[in-house]
Image (tube, helix red, strand yellow):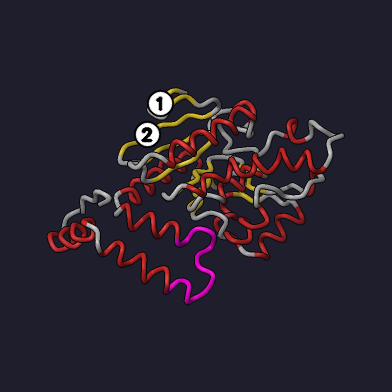
C-alpha cells in the first residue's frame, strides 16, 4: 500500500491523525502469516517510523478475521537438510526484524482482532499494550510442531504473564481465548471482535495526547519489564523526571490544570 510513508508489500500503513499510525498485516488469505515480503516490508517500515519525529503511537492489527498466524511454515521447513548454522543465519534476522518494533521509543498497541498464533502472538507480546477479541484464539504451540519457541517468546511470554502461564502455554501448546488471556494478564482487555480496533485507536489517541517527551521516557523505562532493581529505578527517575521538568510541555500541563482545560503539548 502507498501512503505518506511509502509502499509496503503485505502491509497497510494509515496515519490516523495526532501522531497515531495504524499498521495492518495484510495477507488475509493466509491469516496474515509473516511472509518474506511482509517481513522485508516490516523492517523497512520500522526504520521509517524510527525517523518520524511526529510519531506518537503505533497500533498493529491484522486484515480479515486473523491477527497473525505466525511464521510462514513453508519457509520455516523449506530446508530440511540445512545445517544448524545455516538455519540460525536465517532465523536470527527474522527475529530481529519483527522485534524491531521494540526499538521504537513510542508506545505500541496490538489490536488482536482474531487468532494470534506462534510468532503472531509473540509480536503482540512485543507491543506495550494489547487488546484482544474475546473469542480470538491465542497460543504458542511451537513444541506441538516439533520446534523450540523462537522470536524471544521464552522471554516475552513470562515477562508479560509470568512463568506459570508461560510454562503451561509453551509446554502444552494450549490455546486460550481472548477472554481467558485477559484473566491471565496476556492482554489488557478483551472485547467483542468488532470493538477491538476502535478501542485500541481510542487508547492510542489518549496516549498520543499526553506529553511526548514524558511518554517516550516512560515507555523506555517500562519496556523489558522495568528496571533491574529499586536503586536502578531511582537513578533513572532522578534523571528522567528532571528532563521533563525542563520542558515547555510541563509548563503547559500546569497551566492547563489550573485553567481546567485539555493541555496542548508540543514535545518541547
Which residue occupies the extreme right position in the image?
81
Image vertical order of residue 251 relative to residue 264, above or below: below
Which of the two residues, 171 or 218, is positioned nearer the viewer here?
Answer: 218
Q: Is residue 86 left or right of residue 198?
A: right
171 left or right of 234? right
- Percent position (x, y) of residue 70? 65, 39
Residue nearest the viewer, comparing 33 with 189: 33
Instruction: Give the SS element for disc 1.
Output: strand
Gap between marks 1 and 2 measured at Cα:
8 Å
Instruction: Give the image location of residue 148, x and y in percent.
Output: 77, 49
Magenta extent: 221-234
Tell whether label 2 touches label 1 (CB within 8 Å). yes
Residue position marked by numbered label 2 in the rendering = 15
Residue beneath the point at 56% across and 52% down: 179
Find out whether residue 228 is within the magenta segment.
Answer: yes
Circle 2 sits in a helix, a strand or a loop, which is it? strand
Q: Residue furthest left?
A: 259
* 205 up-or-down from 185: above or below: above
In the image, taking residue 123 as reference, residue 236 lies left or right, namely left
Please indicate whether residue 241 sits to the left or right of residue 250 in the image: right
Residue extending farthest bottom: 231
Residue drawn at the location 41% of the way across and 45% of the way down: 199
**Percent coordinates x, y for residue 33 in the rendering:** 64, 33
Q: Residue at x 12, y 59 (%)?
A: 259
Percent of width and height locating residue 43: 54, 36
- Badge 1: how crowded within 10 Å, few (<14), some, or many (20+)? few
Which tag, 1 or 2, sits closer to the chain's start?
Answer: 1
What number is the disc on residue 35? none
| Number of other residues with Cα within 10 Å of mark 2, as a class: few under 14, some 14 to 19, many 20 or more | some
The mark found on residue 3 in the picture is: 1
Residue at position x 53%, y 31% in the image: 63
Examine the rendered structure and indicate whether residue 267 appears above or below residue 168: above
Amino acid at each position: 500500500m502507498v501512503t505518506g510513508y511509502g509502499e509496503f508489500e503485505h502491509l497497510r500503513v494509515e496515519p490516523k491523525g495526532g501522531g497515531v499510525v495504524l499498521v495492518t498485516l495484510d495477507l488475509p488469505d493466509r491469516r496474515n502469516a509473516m511472509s518474506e515480503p511482509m517481513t522485508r516490508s516490516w523492517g523497512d517500515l520500522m526504520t521509517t517510523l524510527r525517523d518520524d519525529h511526529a510519531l506518537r503511537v503505533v497500533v498493529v492489527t491484522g486484515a480479515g478475521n486473523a491477527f497473525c498466524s505466525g511464521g510462514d511454515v513453508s519457509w520455516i521447513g523449506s530446508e530440511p537438510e540445512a545445517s544448524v548454522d545455516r538455519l540460525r543465519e536465517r532465523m536470527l534476522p527474522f527475529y530481529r526484524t519483527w522485534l524491531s518494533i521494540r526499538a521504537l521509543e513510542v508506545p505500541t498497541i496490538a489490536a488482536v482482532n482474531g487468532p494470534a498464533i506462534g510468532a503472531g502472538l509473540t509480536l503482540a507480546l512485543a507491543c506495550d499494550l494489547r487488546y484482544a477479541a474475546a473469542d480470538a484464539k491465542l497460543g504458542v504451540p511451537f513444541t506441538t510442531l516439533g520446534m523450540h519457541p523462537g522470536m524471544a517468546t521464552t522471554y516475552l511470554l513470562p515477562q508479560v504473564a509470568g512463568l506459570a502461564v508461560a510454562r503451561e502455554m509453551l509446554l502444552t501448546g494450549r490455546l486460550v481465548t481472548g477472554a481467558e488471556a485477559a484473566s491471565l494478564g496476556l492482554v489488557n482487555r478483551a472485547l467483542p471482535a468488532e470493538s477491538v480496533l476502535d478501542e485500541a485507536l481510542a487508547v492510542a489517541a489518549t496516549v498520543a495526547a499526553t506529553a511526548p517527551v514524558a511518554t517516550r521516557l516512560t515507555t523506555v523505562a517500562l519496556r523489558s519489564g522495568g528496571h533491574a532493581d529499586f536503586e536502578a529505578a531511582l537513578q533513572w527517575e532522578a534523571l528522567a523526571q528532571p528532563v521533563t521538568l525542563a520542558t515547555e510541555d510541563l509548563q503547559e500541563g500546569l497551566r492547563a490544570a489550573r485553567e481546567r482545560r485539555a493541555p496542548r503539548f508540543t514535545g518541547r
